[in-house]
Amino acid sequence: MTGWGVDLRLDDFAWDARGDPVSAARAVAEGAARRAGGQDYDGGFPAEDVAALARAGLLAAPVPRRDGGAGLGEETNGSILRAVLTRIGCGSLALGRLYEGHVNAVQLVARYGTGAGRTRLLADAVQGHLFGVWNTEPPGNGLLIDAADGAPVLRGVKSFASGAGFVTRALVTAQHAGDAPAGGSQMIVVALEPGERADPSAWRAHGMRASASGTVDFTGLGADRFTPVGAPDDYQAQPHFSSGAWRFLAVQLGGLEAVLDAWRGHLAATGRGEDPHQLARLGEGVIAAETARLWVARAAAAASELEGDGDGIVAYVNLARFAVERAGLDLLERAQRSVGLQGFLRDHPLERLARDLATYLRQPGPDRALTEGARHVLRAPQASGDLWLDEA
Ligand SMILES: Cc1cc2nc3c(=O)[nH]c(=O)nc-3n(C[C@H](O)[C@H](O)[C@H](O)COP(=O)(O)OP(=O)(O)OC[C@H]3O[C@@H](n4cnc5c(N)ncnc54)[C@H](O)[C@@H]3O)c2cc1C
């Protein structure tokens, strides 16, 4: 059993994701959208929807083909993974957050893992284990690998850890105790039982309640419980580290689309849509969502450019972060103004969708992302028209 109420074996997969991952994601997202309201409470979690991801083969899909998966994310311009993430995010931003973390972890294991540990972890993903990437930690109590007494033992906690208590393979960053606080960050994957070590009470959030982004205390777990992945600092190796942000942008885009649809539904249901002010606001909202979509598509394509200019790729994705955040905030402002107080009542579809999106738009260092993108442009020798990728 993997903890999702289904006894998964390789042969049991419908392998929808191997054939058409986007249709599989769309089907999972439809169920997730129906259930998301019922999961919107402190301690909520989309367990049925994660089980649906597993059954559809979407937990296995990011594993490379040669390792038994579908190689989702290996396509040349990231377009299939992008569509999968957006579709799931549109159904439920909490589920999208969890799935994005799973994909990120599996890709990190595939890229940096070696030997028997890599083989075993990728087999775990194929078998339906939910992975997560937990990097954030509270000041002064971050995760350490302490080998002072011989055998390595973990000490410390991770915070804002999505899927805390549900993720059974947690890719975490940890410093060797002697090197802290300035040493390199070592990736390890910790095997956890459902509910183990998690404090869900640390996640009392405005939105994204069902993402279970609580605190996990690893103190006392020994080396038999974790597998090292890669070398120190591989986690932050560029351009992968910063350009990987395009994946959460793709999930956020799904959240924008869900808000836009709830807003359109309200205008249709109330017969207020033809009012010229409402039409103008709706037009601006559509432009915001489409702006986000275009940035996400180009960011995903840029991040897939293995031979590209790494600094340029990072700068583009950093700027895309700001563009998508701005688009999300513009969309929320217009949707809430357009729907009015109804949109703040708990039984209105816009209410939870707006809270979830506003919360998930909070990502690390947004000012730094904008200014580093701007600095790249400031120093670039090219003319503005030649700054980025292609241009057919
Ligand atoms: C729903 C959800 C799920 C999450 N799940 C995970 C997870 O599974 N794993 C994980 O590792 N993390 C997770 N996180 C945490 C996430 O990665 C970020 O750590 C978090 O979102 C940071 O948000 P923040 O607004 O506090 O960012 P900050 O970076 O603290 O930014 C807040 C503000 O301060 C500014 N700022 C930042 N640094 C400085 C500075 N040095 N000096 C001055 N100003 C500064 C920023 O520009 C911004 O204006 C999750 C977050 C959310 C919302």
Image: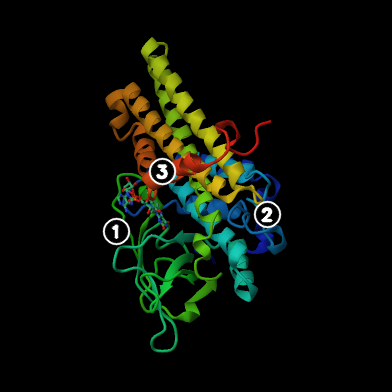
Of the two numbered discs 2 and 1 on the same chain, state the one appearing first in sequence: 2
Count of marks placed on residues = 3
Query: At 38% across and 79% down in the image, what residue appears?
Result: 178
17 or 292, nearer to the observer? 292
Question: Residue 202 bears which disc, if any?
Answer: 1
Q: Under tag 1, what secondary structure?
A: helix
Asked whether the beta carbons under mark 2 and mark 1 sit within 8 Å of each other, the answer is no
Residue 168 in percent (x, y) is at 48, 65
Percent coordinates x, y for residue 111 in the rendering: 61, 62
How far is mark 2 from mark 1, CA to CA? Answer: 36 Å
The tag earlier along the polypeptide, 2 or 3, is 2
Please identify the quarter of the rendering in which residue 219 is found: bottom left
Which residue is depicted at the point 38% across and 14% down?
Answer: 272
Q: Nearer the viewer, mark 2 or mark 3?
A: 3
Crowd rating for badge 2 (residues with CA inside 10 Å; few <14, some 14–19, many 20+): many
Residue named by callout 3: 371
Marks 1/3 in contact by CB < 8 Å: the verdict is: no
The amino acid on which the numbered mark 3 sits, given as a three-letter code, is Thr
- Between marks 1 and 3 in the image, the one whose residue lies nearer the viewer: 3
x 47%, y 24%: residue: 286
Confirm whether residue 374 shows in the render: yes
270 to 349, vertically: above or below: above
- Going by the numbered disc 2, the residue's amino acid type is Ala
Mark 1 Cβ inside 8 Å of ligand 1: no
In this picture, residue 299 sits left or right of residue 324: right
On the question of residue 6 being in view, the answer is no
Could you tell me the amino acid type at mark 1? Ala
Of the pair 194 and 373, the residue shown nearer to us: 373
Q: Does 337 appear above or below 174?
A: above
Residue at screen point 62% across, 67% down: 123
Tell me the number on the disc at residue 70: 2
| Structural distance between the alpha carbons of marks 1 and 3 | 31 Å
